[in-house]
Amino acid sequence: MQKYLLHRIRSFGFALKGIKDLIKNHPNAQIHLLATWIVIIASIWLKVTATEGCLLALCIVLVLALEAMNSAIEYLADKISPEQDLLIGKAKDIAAGAVLIAAVGAAIVGCLIFLPKLWLAFAQ
């Protein structure tokens, strides 16, 4: 049992190492983190509801998780085939597309939540 727990604790360390790499070495992840801070600040300022906050949090988590998966796929693809390869290129493009789909969806959710609140805040 103790060995099992030690392995689980170590696995968290590996995950944190991956998150650190993502934040440090991937500019798109840095942009997503900046957007996350803006959303958090706007959520506090505009007093979003708990439901709205949950939707925003889910969007943030989805985009960041997909960005992490995209970066992992890029690392693996570059290791497997450092030279240009049509199928590797397609895999990387689709992974990047998944992030874009999530980011656009998150932006739509953000607009649906924030625009009416901003309208009310500045219309007065």
Image (tube, rainbow, N blue to C red):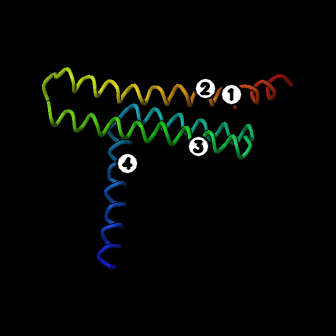
Q: Where does residue 112 sit, x and y in percent of width and height?
A: 68, 27
- What residue type is disc 2 on? Ile
Task: Measure the C-alpha gap from mark 4 to mark 1.
Answer: 30 Å
Check disc 4 and report the residue beneath it: 19
- 1 and 3 marks in contact (CB < 8 Å): no
Mark pair 3, 2: CA separation: 14 Å
Left or right of 84 in this view: 68: right
Report the amino acid beneath label 1: Leu
Q: Which mark is residue 12?
A: none
Q: Amino acid at mark 4?
A: Ile
Within 10 Å of disc 4 (Cα), the crowding (few <14, some 14-19, many 20+) is: some
**Which residue is drawn at the image coordinates 27% and 23% (left, top)?**
90
- Name the N-terminal-most of marks 3 and 2: 3
Q: Earlier in the sequence, mark 4 or mark 1?
A: 4
Residue 88 lies left or right of residue 70; in this view the side is: left
**Separation (CA) of disc 2 from disc 4:** 26 Å
Q: CA distance from mark 1 to mark 3?
A: 14 Å
Judged from the image, the secondary structure of the residue bearing numbered disc 3 is helix
Where is mark 2, residue-wise? 108
Mark 1, residue position: 112
> Does dot 2 land on a helix, a strand or a loop?
helix
Q: CA distance from mark 1 to mark 2?
A: 6 Å
Give neighbour class at mark 3: few <14, some 14-19, many 20+ (Cα, 10 Å).
Answer: some
Q: Residues within 10 Å of mark 1 (few under 14, many from 20)?
A: few
The front one of 86 and 37 is 86
* x, y percent for residue 45: 72, 39
- First reached walking from the N terminus: tag 2 or tag 4: 4
Disc nearer the start of the sequence (1/3): 3
Question: In the rendered image, which residue does mark 3 sit on?
Answer: 57
